[in-house]
Amino acid sequence: MLYILTTFLAAVLLRLPIFHKPGVSLSFIDSLFTAASSVSVTGLSVVTVHEVFNNGGIVLLTVLFQIGGIGIMTLSTLFWLLFGQRIGLEQRMVIATDHNRPGLSGLVQLMRSILMIALIIELIGTVLLGTYTWLAGYHDHWYTAYFNSFFTSVSAFTNAGFFLQSDSMISYANDYIYQVIVMFLIISGAIGFPVLLELKRRLVNRKQRQHFSLFTKITTLTFAVLIVVGALLFYVFEQGRFLQDKSWHESFFYALFHSVSSRSGGLSTMDISLLSTSTMMMLSGLMFIGASPSSVGGGIRTTTFFVLVAAVFAYMRGYKEVKVFGRELEEDDIKRAFIVFFAAIGLIFTSVLLLTAFEDIPFERLLFEVCSAFGTTGLSAGITETLGTASKIVLIITMIIGRIGLVNLLLLKKDDQPVRIRYPKEHVIVGQ
């Protein structure tokens, strides 16, 4: 509910003339779409940022990125602490839900750590991008270089997918240094705050031997494998098409950057509409999986995908338990993964079905747009601005659900469990 209220408040603010350039106006549906895309850190846009918003509006967008990326409750906790307010049980329960935490202990310290890590990484990104673009001659003035880099750094780390230029990062297609910095920011935001916190503890306590948690092992492995597989498939599918006249290093960075960006970043160094159908379908699958839990991204999450694959292989081999990295997965987590997966499939199917009824656009492009919204990615096949009001509303709902993980909220355990009634068991013929 907090994300929904924040989205409507943001829509009202983004429509105010004080945030627009002279002579520019924004309809309510477009301001609502921009607000939803900003708060859900998606990046799908029906407007060109630098043509519509002035510097004040650009700063407002970065604030919305922070709210959506780092989390409403994280920033709310900061303000409560600044004003000397005590964090009560109800607020702690909301924080735990917002960050997928099983317990209520140590949440305030967790919020402080998350905020500190986020600000440090964004500051590093701003300094690196600002200094590089200024020295490389992309901007005439140092303050313009650092202002634009501040926006890019926050957008990349929070995986918001917005860029101040209308063609996203196409003008940086051959600037590999710039791309590497942006990819570092995207991965830092999408890998998940629990992973970043474990890395921080490992760096701070070097002398103490520490083992990474099962969550970090699964997340890091799945994240890395998806990036590698995505890059390889991009290269294979586009070798005879978009990449046919490109050098090896151009092909490498096109494939790698868009594999990383499909995690949840949403920035692009090429016109996505030029991709083949097979590549768009592959990227749709990557966006559907999305980023890691407790990160700035959406989708079903990397751990959900890992648990699904591990469970299917285990059951196919006749095992009743799912074992990974010397540990046995909880049955409740396996059930949760399957429920999240099928609920997400239902959401994607419904959204695409509605869009096909509203728009006369090829199916694969509509699927790509919906998966981009659900994964809060922001990559677009170039059809977002052409969509009608009904289609925009569908994508708004999909973006919000993708960010807050509504399917996860449906699985929260309640204290007052109903009385369990056992029925006789009976086999059903399946798959034959």
Image (cartoon, rainbow, N blue to C red):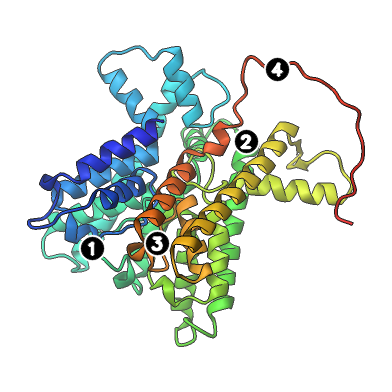
Label drawn at residue 133: 1
Question: Looking at numbered disc 4 in the image, what kind of residue is underneath it?
Answer: Pro
Question: Against 323, is 1 above or below?
Answer: above
Q: Is residue 359 left or right of residue 27?
A: right
First along the sequence among labels 2 and 3? 3
How many C-alpha atoms fall within 10 Å of the one at disc 2: few (<14), some, or many (≥20)?
few
> Which residue is denoted by mark 4 in the rendering?
418
Q: Secondary structure at mark 1?
A: helix
Pick the front one: 84 or 41:
41
Residue at the front extreme, as displayed = 357
Rendering coords of residue 151 (x, y %):
25, 51
Name the amino acid, label 2: Ser
Per the image, label 4 sits on a secondary structure element best described as loop
Which residue is drawn at the image coordinates 90% and 49% (left, top)? 429
Q: Nearer the viewer, residue 260 or 274?
A: 274
Residue 125 in view (yes/no): no
- The answer for how far apart the CA atoms under marks 2 and 3 are is 28 Å
Residue placed under numbered mark 2 in the picture:
213
Mark 4 or 2, closer to the camera? 4
The residue wearing badge 3 is 180
Q: For label 3, count other residues whose C-alpha is less than 10 Å away and answer few (under 14), some (14-19) or many (20+).
A: some
Judged from the image, the secondary structure of the residue bearing numbered disc 3 is: helix
